[in-house]
């Protein structure tokens, strides 16, 4: 079932580099994700031979980095805002099926709950998700969606 299949995770034991700004280890991300989401000027500087990682630290402005400390991409090099890097209500929590923080919050305010998780899970089966090219973190959004629903329920009017 597509890109959320855990068997596709890359083994990175010999790739011990960390974010040049915040020193976090980051998460593996395929070059397809960068090709799809970087703005053209940045995309032109991509190196096919490099292993890129995604920095998950919320207040770190580096989004993608590699073993070369001088070669990285920042949040403003992307076409979209990354869920963990921007806590704005207009930011997507699910990129494949178009859920933003606001759209989930609106549903909770209106009905007291949200069917976002059920809906996303159903759509992952059919038509299927494409997180590798839609989500800046290059993988499944469900963790971010679950976290936001929890927060939004505390947050509601
Ligand atoms: Zn970082």
Image (spheres, rainbow, N blue to C red):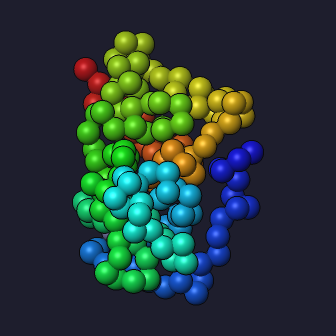
Quick one: quadrant of the C terminus? top left
Residue at coordinates 59% horizontally, 78% vertically from top-left? Answer: 12
Locate residue 90, reporting x and y percent. Answer: 30, 33
Locate residue 20, reporting x and y percent. Answer: 31, 78
Compared to 40, does 62 lie above or below? Answer: below
Of 29 and 26, the residue lying toward us: 29
Quick one: quadrant of the N terminus? top right
Compared to 45, does 151 lie above or below? Answer: above
Quadrant of the rendered structure where residue 144 is? Answer: top left
Residue 42 is at least partly visible in this image: yes
Of 71 and 109, the residue lying toward us: 71
Locate residue 93, reporting x and y percent. Answer: 43, 39
Report whether 148 appears left or right of 87.
right
Locate residue 22, reporting x and y percent. Answer: 28, 74
Residue 55 is at least partly visible in this image: no
Quadrant of the rendered structure where residue 45 is? Answer: bottom left
């Amino acid at each position: 079932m597509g890109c959320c299949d855990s068997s596709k995770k890359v083994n990175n034991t010999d790739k011990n580099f960390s974010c040049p700004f915040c020193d976090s280890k980051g998460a593996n991300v395929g070059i397809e994700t960068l090709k799809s989401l970087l703005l053209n000027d940045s995309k032109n500087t991509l190196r096919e031979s490099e292993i890129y990682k995604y920095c998950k630290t919320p207040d770190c402005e580096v989004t993608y980095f590699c073993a070369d400390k001088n070669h990285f991409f920042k949040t403003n090099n992307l076409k979209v805002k990354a869920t963990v890097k921007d806590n704005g209500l207009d930011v997507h929590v699910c990129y494949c099926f178009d859920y933003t923080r606001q759209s989930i919050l609106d549903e909770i305010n209106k009905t007291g709950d949200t069917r976002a998780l059920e809906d996303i899970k159903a759509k992952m089966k059919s038509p299927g998700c494409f997180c590798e090219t839609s989500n800046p973190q290059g993988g499944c959004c469900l963790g971010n969606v679950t976290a936001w629903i929890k927060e939004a329920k505390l947050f509601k009017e």
